Image (cartoon, grey):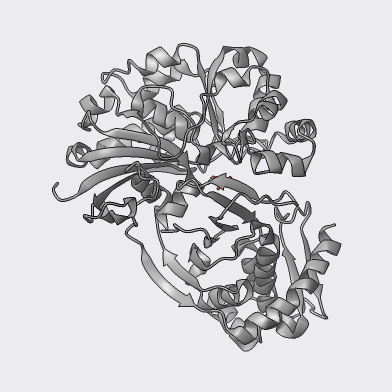
Amino acid sequence: MSGGAFYLGIDVGTQSLTALLVEVTPAGGDGDSDDRARGIVARAGVRYDSELPAYGTVNGQLPGDDPAIGRVPPCMWLDALDLALHRLGPEACQAVRGVSVSGQQHGSVYLAAGAKRALAALTPDRSLAQQVEPLLSRAEAPIWTDSSTTQECAEIRHALGGAAATAELTGSDTFERFTGPQVRRFARTDPEAWADTAHVCLVSSFVTSVLTGRVAPIDHGDGSGMNLLDIRRLEWSGAAMTATAEGLDRRLAPPCPPWTIVGKIAPYFVSRYGLPASAQVVAGSGDNPCSLVGVGVREPGEAVLSLGTSDTYFGLLKEVAVDPDANGHVFIAPSGHPMSLICFRNGSLAREAVRDRYGLDWPAFDAALRATPPGNDGLMMLPWFEPEIVPRVASPRVVRLGGLTDGPEHAARNCRAVVEGQFLSMRLNSEWMATRPTRIVATGGGSRNRELLQIAADVLGCRVESLEVSDGAALGAALRATGRRICPLPPIGEPGPSVEPRPEAAAIYDAMLPRYAEAQRLAAG
Ligand code: XUL
């Protein structure tokens, strides 16, 4: 391979691992941002369920009767890494100048005391999984789908002075999937294994540790999904560690900035796959911070609207702003800026529920949006077809207001009401971010729908550009592997429709917002 420099991003996702090699060409200037990513030159993916069947996972986690439990044998990720590098092939591996990992956020891996020495001595004669398995003090890693820690969330929240104080300190209230509550539960339910634990890693720092042959630090980005990092001082919080588990401070390496070079690639990867011994390993980070880079969001005010099963809205903030209602999260982005994230469970799930209720297909749903006016003549919906995360609504409840019925005479009105309700909720519940969006990049299945984007632009009062980016987290990780604080511009994916807010429609939504806020307050309690 010739031309620029090549960087490898490895995304350890929930259902699959993706390795992406990206070419970056310095543009000749002296600033970080003069580099340009030219394109993806190689890709290898491994799906856990179908390609590593020996682990018996379903949708990337171990099956079981208790839906609150979400666990993974961590060595599965290492087998996937070995397989992906093998598939990338020697030509791609030999070109790698830097590597970084994107990990599904919140998941934790527990290493025993001998791990430090053993990681430094990994031999190419045996697989990573065979060598790392004996170093684990806990056979299964809890991941972000695990919600078994309600008791621990309450205990930590109480010790830190309540939900608002916890969010003020760590960027988020306690959430079941966050690492601190998971660590507390482990230490309480298996004190012997906790005593054997010398290092607590996240998915991103665990795989980075293996890549570099030493226990890697946790970066500020992934560290902010733990309820342990002081979000302003960017240090582990003594109070949060004490509230979580005895001796946790000894088990966490100091956190590091996301652009930290943690070492060179371990000899294992040089001998086995031909990576150059000089290849740098940059601290791993979480998949959401990495995706932000992968879709090309670089400035405070730019945000991503991911319209998928659930709808997620995240973006860069000028400074730390914490949600006083404690529903949202503040993480640290790869550039060091704070980034906000809110996740609405009733995304395409709710849109589909309305579509199916009236026996429509998507073109008919769009036609209904076109046939009804902005503001829906005052007919509104609180679209909680499933329990909602933001605001917290424990049992499903669809609230129709202003005379809206669920009868067939109001089929088109319901289509508009569900979409307007979703974006009004997004606007209302993101006001705490205190950074008005200047540009929104929409991704995910719903972003192909022009009518939906127009309502988003009108309600949020901002231009919305849609972009089909697959492998956004792996791409972000590859760009981070350059070690630049401001990552090179990525090869942006397929552009879809872009829409500007229409002033008359935006004025209608401005007027509607207080009514929606009051309805939400009454219904969500
Ligand atoms: C974010 C979250 C998920 C995981 C897995 O808080 O729990 O997005 O990062 O993708």
Residue found at x 64% / y 17%: 247
Q: Is residue 331 left or right of residue 159?
A: left
Q: Is residue 85 above or below residue 288?
A: above
Residue found at x 66% / y 60%: 430
Q: Position of residue 452 (x, y in %)?
A: 56, 74
Q: Is residue 221 left or right of residue 323?
A: left
Looking at the image, which is closer to me, 58 or 277? 277
Residue found at x 71% / y 20%: 188
Q: Position of residue 390 (x, y in %)?
A: 70, 55
Q: Is residue 494 above or below residue 407?
A: above
Q: Is residue 293 above or below residue 148?
A: below
Q: Position of residue 293 (x, y in %)?
A: 42, 53
Q: Is residue 90 left or right of residue 176?
A: left
Q: Position of residue 487 (x, y in %)?
A: 37, 50
Looking at the image, which is closer to me, 347 or 8? 8
- In the rendered image, the residue lying farthest to the left is 2
- In the rendered image, the residue lying farthest to the front is 30
Looking at the image, which is closer to me, 100 or 523? 100
Quadrant showing the C terminus: bottom right
Is residue 235 visible from the viewing direction of this image? yes
Q: Is residue 488 above or below residue 132?
A: below
Looking at the image, which is closer to me, 252 or 411? 252
Is residue 54 visible from the viewing direction of this image? no
How many badges with numbers are in the image?
A: 0
